[in-house]
């Protein structure tokens, strides 16, 4: 089948690689250069959790992805995931922490927040009354290395990847317009992240685009710290980063933005990050050594949006979004293959029905 993939972030790269391997004639289009930093997939690290508290379907997806991560690592000749362990934390009675514990294969007892200080030899601190669930099956993915691997691997399997080519909006039918010229395909998969609503306006109401900023923090005595995911108002999360730094950001802080005109990190972001760093990382320098901006595409219930266009059954919006998609990347190509062959797995069926898990956080903070 002649398939177009619009957008080559992690989703489009996974889809292009897998469909080419399956024998489809794949053309992938990306508006920017390879490994650009203007979408949602850039950066050195992403959190991997085999027992995500977002819902049972994500646990199934994470376990399915994990086996495929081993295949990608074998092909790349290097590991992509470092298993650091993680701390899922929140105010007493947090539904997110309880869900992580309930769904875990090793449902150990919860700890109190004040135990974390001793556990990390003073490097991490949390309110003493918090619930904390320690997850061993948690770590960090070398995100940019994965993108670089797929940029090499997809063409080896026959995908034609075109960079610096912007598909004109809106997409109407199974045709793409490139610099005024039309190209017809048997199927189009729109993996355009924050731009998906512009390309397929029928979905724009379901895809809010948000600006997010992460900061990197230095310690005078760096050591490997665990991943942290907090069910607090800010949705703070953190993870080890290269060169002994610790990186953190907020799942729920950052206003709406247009993906084409996103503000760079500024003093306001720095102050917000520094305030939280002083509390969470008492032995780190509170001023971030670096800040990076990123785009979150968020659905109302924070589930992924995978759905065919109402105007053409062979045009699919494929948005593994809401700030938690990267860990499932190897499954995305399988989903695309299932959709093309009309043999959806129960997981894909659940997403296409609009189902999924639960919000980690109730409300977005502007
Ligand atoms: C700060 C941050 C932290 C995150 N942390 C985690 C984490 O710890 N764990 C986790 O699992 N997930 C995490 N995520 C989520 C994960 O990174 C995203 O779910 C994932 O990267 C989404 O990938 P994507 O391919 O859908 O989007 P993108 O990477 O944005 O890719 C879309 C691509 O489409 C291209 N495009 C758009 N329009 C056009 C057009 N008209 N023509 C051609 N190309 C076009 C864009 O340029 C872009 O490259 C995080 C996300 C962010 C932003």
Image (cartoon, grey):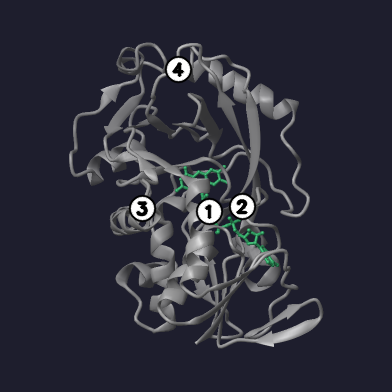
Q: How crowded is mark 3: few (under 14 residues within 10 Å), some or many (20 or more)?
A: some
Q: Position of residue 81 (x, y in %)?
A: 37, 43
- In which quadrant of the rendered view does residue 215 lie? top right
Label annotation for residue 35: 2
Q: Is mark 3 within 8 Å of ligand 1?
A: no
Q: How far apart, in angstroms, are the residues tagged by discs 4 and 1?
A: 28 Å
Sequence order check, earlier mark of 2 and 4:
2
Secondary structure beneath label 2: loop
Sequence order check, earlier mark of 3 and 4:
3
Residues at marks 1 and 2 touching, judged by CB atoms closer than 8 Å? yes
Q: How far apart, in angstroms, are the residues tagged by discs 1 and 2?
A: 7 Å
For the point 76% across and 41% down, the residue is 263
Q: Name the residue under label 4.
A: 222
- Left or right: residue 236 versus residue 60 is right
**Which of the pair 298/337 is nearer the observer?**
337
Q: Name the residue under label 1.
A: 148
Q: Where is residue 105 in the image (x, y as percent from the top left)?
A: 19, 44
Q: Position of residue 4 (x, y in %)?
A: 58, 78
Q: How far apart, in angstroms, are the residues tagged by discs 3 and 4?
A: 27 Å
Secondary structure beneath label 4: loop
């Amino acid at each position: 089948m002649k398939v177009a993939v619009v957008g080559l972030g992690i989703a489009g790269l996974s889809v292009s690689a897998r469909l080419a391997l399956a024998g489809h004639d794949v053309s992938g289009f990306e508006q920017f250069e390879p490994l650009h930093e203007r979408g949602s997939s850039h950066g050195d690290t992403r959190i991997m959790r085999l027992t995500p508290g977002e819902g049972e379907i994500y646990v199934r997806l994470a376990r399915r992805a994990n086996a495929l991560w081993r295949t990608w690592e074998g092909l790349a000749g290097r590991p992509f995931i470092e298993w650091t362990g993680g701390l899922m934390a929140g105010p007493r009675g947090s539904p997110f922490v309880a869900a992580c514990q309930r769904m875990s294969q090793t449902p150990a007892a919860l700890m109190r927040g004040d135990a974390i200080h001793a556990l990390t030899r003073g490097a991490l601190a949390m309110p003493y009354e918090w619930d904390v669930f320690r997850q061993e099956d948690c770590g960090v993915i070398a995100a940019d290395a994965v993108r670089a691997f797929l940029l090499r691997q997809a063409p080896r399997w026959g995908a034609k990847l075109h960079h610096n080519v912007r598909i004109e909006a809106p997409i109407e039918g199974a045709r793409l317009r490139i610099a005024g010229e039309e190209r017809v395909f048997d199927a189009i998969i729109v993996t355009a992240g924050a731009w998906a609503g512009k390309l397929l306006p029928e979905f724009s109401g379901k895809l809010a685009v948000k600006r997010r900023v992460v900061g990197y923090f230095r310690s005078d005595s760096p050591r490997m710290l665990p991943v942290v995911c907090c069910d607090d108002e800010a949705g703070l999360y953190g993870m080890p980063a290269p060169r002994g730094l610790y990186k953190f950001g907020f799942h729920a802080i950052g206003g709406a933005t247009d993906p084409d005109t996103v503000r760079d990190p500024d003093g306001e972001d720095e102050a917000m990050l520094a305030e939280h760093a002083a509390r969470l990382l008492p032995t780190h320098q509170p001023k971030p050594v670096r800040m990076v901006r990123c785009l979150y595409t968020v659905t109302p219930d924070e589930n992924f949006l995978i759905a065919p266009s109402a105007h053409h059954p062979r045009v699919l919006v494929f948005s593994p979004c809401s700030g938690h998609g990267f860990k499932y990347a190897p499954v995305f190509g399988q989903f695309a293959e299932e959709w093309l062959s009309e043999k959806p797995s129960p997981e894909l069926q659940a997403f296409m029905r609009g189902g999924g898990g639960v919000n980690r956080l109730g409300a977005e903070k502007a």
